[in-house]
Image: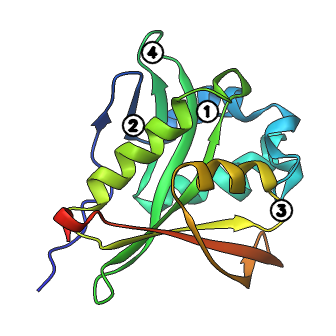
Amino acid sequence: MTPDFDSQPTLVGPCVTLRPLVAADFEALHAAASDPLIWEQHPQPERWQRDVFRTAFFEGAVASGSAFVVLDNASGAIIGSTRYYDWQPQERSIAVGFTFLARAWWGGPTNQEVKQLLLDHAWHWADTVWFHIGVQNLRSRRALEKLGGRFSHVEERSSGGALVSTAFYCIDAPAGRR
């Protein structure tokens, strides 16, 4: 029997820490998310707006019990968010997503470190980690391919009450971890 997935540990890397998201994080997380360019390729490009961010992202993230804030270790500032979802114990698979970083942390090692922390933790329970990315979100798709994500297929999924063409990518656990 597969034990329950530990969906919200604190994960510490050299440059960032992922810690459980709490309701008191709203102001700092919204400040990191309030740049319209972060969301321009997202299926909900208005997510930078305070009320949209609260209802379309933050409230669900807190309620999920599996969301994190991304903290910059040097400054302690909240610079983004990510989460686990869709744990399938029979298939030993989980999804990672809802990830965003403030633009000052784009293009460097931060996204890779965030994803690697999540993957390393997931491999204790899962054999496959899925990533669901809007087909039009080329920036995120390229970033995931750089991490070794393998394109699987496109499927229509609900996002913000609308069906969105979603690219499915996966990364399998390293041979020694399965």
Q: Which residue is mark 3?
A: 43
Mark 3 or mark 1, which is nearer the start of the sequence? 1
Name above or below for residue 55 compared with residue 28. Answer: below
How far apart in space, not on screen, are marks 4 and 2 (Cα)? 11 Å
Q: Which residue is mark 1?
A: 29
Of the image marks 3 and 4, the number of the one nearer the N terminus: 3
- Quadrant location of residue 59? bottom right
User: Which residue is situated farthest in the left direction here?
Assistant: 1
Determine whether 4 is above or below 45 in the image: below
Corner quadrant of residue 125: bottom left
Is mark 3 in CB contact (under 8 Å) with mark 2?
Answer: no
Circles 1 and 3 in contact, beta carbons < 8 Å: no
Of all residues, the one furthest to the top in this rendering is 75
Q: Give the residue number, with chain letter if any, for mark 4.
A: 76
Report the disc number at residue 18: 2
Specify whether residue 22 is in view.
Answer: no
**Residue beneath the point at 61% across and 56% down:** 145
Task: Identify the mark nearer the N-term, 4 or 1.
Answer: 1
Depth check, mark 2 against mark 1: the one in front is 2
Q: Nearer the viewer, mark 1 or mark 3?
A: 3
- SS category of the residue bearing label 2: strand
Q: Position of residue 36 (x, y in %)?
A: 87, 37
Mark 2 residue type = Leu
